[in-house]
Amino acid sequence: MNSGFIDAFAQVIREKRVDKNTLVETIKMSLISAAKRKLGQNAEVRVELDEAKGVLEIYRVFNVVKEVTDEEFEIDLKQAKEMDGKAKIGSEVVVSLPIEDFGRNAIQTAKQVLMQKVREAERERIYEDYKDKIGMIVSGTVRQVDRGNILINLGRAEAYLPLREQIRKERYNQGETIRACILDVDKEAKGPQIILSRTSDQFLKKLFEQEVPEIFDGDVEIKNIAREPGGRSKIAVFSRNDKVDAVGSCVGMKGSRVQAVVNELHGEKIDIVNWSDISSEFVSRALAPAKVSSLRFNEATYEVLSVVEEDQLSLAIGREGQNVRLASRLTGWRIELMTVRNAERRDRLESKLQMDISEMYGVTSRLAQKLTSIGILTVQKLNKTPVEDILEIEGIGPKTAEKLKATADETMDELNRALEELIEKEKEAEAEEKALFDHEIFTEKEEEKEEEVRLTEEQLFKDFEDKDADEEEKGETAGEEATAGEEPSEEEPSVEEEIPAEEEVSTDEEEPSVEEEIPAEEKATADPAPEAVEEPDTGTEIESDDDKKE
């Protein structure tokens, strides 16, 4: 081959960034495959490349034998002498092969093998370059958008941004620049090996590292991230330097740093809170902007009851429960919200349902004494006590402890159901009370009653309009004499006659009596009596190991 091959060889190395030795071996293998396709699979073919001269030579090798059994790689001595006068039995004869003799099919095969090997080498190179960059942010140009999935050109490699890894409502067109973090690099993928993401928590973390020097330097650490892409995110930060404010560093002057991150995420809201190893402080901060009145932790189930005021409940819940959901993910605690009023009601009703340990089914008096000796006075306390603590009681073995816990669990289920029923009944009673004693209703009635009194006053004196003209003249004369200081005429109605009529009108509508209202109020506000709790039937009494011995 001429020197043009060497130029093409150098161009492939430069553009594909393929290792030189790998490419040389690939070319040799492709030419050998093409030669065997022409000469036979058993033929022995050698390829030599002289880079200095820019020459690529292909040779066919024959073994010299007395009697030929395989013509593809053997030759007799006579034919060998014609090719090489020094040939002898057992030696090799090398014959040069022009590439033009291979034929079109053989050349096409060589091309396919070469391209395949180059692609494999290129994929290996991409994998080696990006396998250690997982989580880093890269920037590229949108090359193609297919059914929401985006193919991105990173320069020397192509990346793939699936629809599931895109922020909702984002739309990109061909040629636009896009930033994302590397989610994974798949060596075995048929298409693009580099998978990108804009919805991962790592993308948000890396954005803050780029915008906040304190995070990049290590003075401020992002402890945890809870994110709903496109909606809202919460991050917990911690300062390793007492002189550095973690939240202030992330927010920046007039919010410039956090605003840069928000703009990159197309308006996603970000809450930044200080991390704390004290659970009560951390949970309270995570529920911001709501203010928490108190917290009640259950270490066994890793749950926490957050008690807030009525006006803070909607803030704590957030839009469609987003705030409390993100706070739970940020802290790792399962958070339940309750108002102060409901919490006080629950505490009051729970105190009524406290069951003495001796009343639990199957507990003998002797066993009750042993449980009481370590402070287990109620079924509720027994239910919260670990089995290990119960086993430390003298005379109680594993079977007895397990039976106690099982019975306590069943009893608590019954008590909890009774508690919920009491709460619902009390809520219904409060609703009825509000309906019966609505002050607005009474105010409207009083106004209507006053209007009725004014109307009846006109009706009271309507009879005087029916008198004839003479009586009207007498009435006018009597009115004039009265204004002069004389007594009015006997025919004019006296004050004593008007008063009973007015009293009769004003008392037409009787006021509701207090005696009738008081029983209704007491009935509406009275606390419902707690229902009797059915004790689970375990069939046998729980006896301690000492009882069994006796």
Image (cartoon, rainbow, N blue to C red):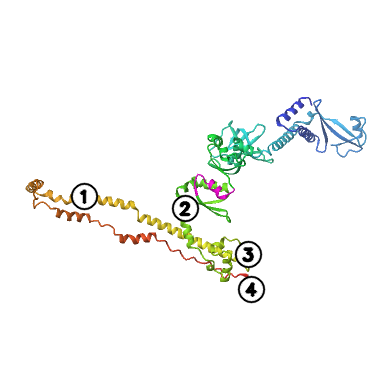
- Disc 1 to disc 4: CB gap under 8 Å: no
The disc at residue 455 is: 1
Q: Is 256 placed above or below 407 here?
A: above
Q: Are marks 1 and 2 in contact (CB under 8 Å)?
A: no
Between 290 and 301, the one lying in front of the other is 290
> Which sits earlier in the primary sequence, circle 1 or circle 4?
1
Q: CA distance from mark 2 to mark 4?
A: 51 Å
Q: Quadrant of the C terminus?
A: bottom right
Q: Amino acid at mark 3?
A: Leu
Query: Nearest the camera: 52 or 136?
Result: 136
Dot 1 or dot 2: first in sequence order is: 2
458 magenta-colored = no
The residues tagged by marks 1 and 2 sit, at their Cα atoms, a distance apart of 50 Å
On screen, 139 above or below 356?
above
Mark 3 vs mark 4, CA separation in Å = 17 Å
Query: Which structural element holds mark 3?
Result: helix
Report the number of numbered marks: 4
Please, what is the three-letter code of the amino acid marked with disc 4? Lys
Distance of label 1 from label 4 (alpha carbons): 93 Å
The answer to whether 323 appears left or right of 159 in the picture is left
Magenta span of residues? 277-292
Q: Residue placed farthest to the bottom in the image?
A: 550
Q: Which mark is residue 425?
A: none
CA separation in Å, label 1 and label 3: 85 Å
Residue position for label 4: 549
Callout 4 secondary element: helix
Q: Residues within 10 Å of mark 2 (few under 14, many from 20)?
A: some
Residue at which label 2 appears: 340
Q: Nearer the viewer, residue 485 or 450?
A: 485
Q: Mark 3 or mark 4: which comes first in sequence?
A: 3
Mark 2 residue type: Val
Q: Secondary structure at mark 2?
A: helix
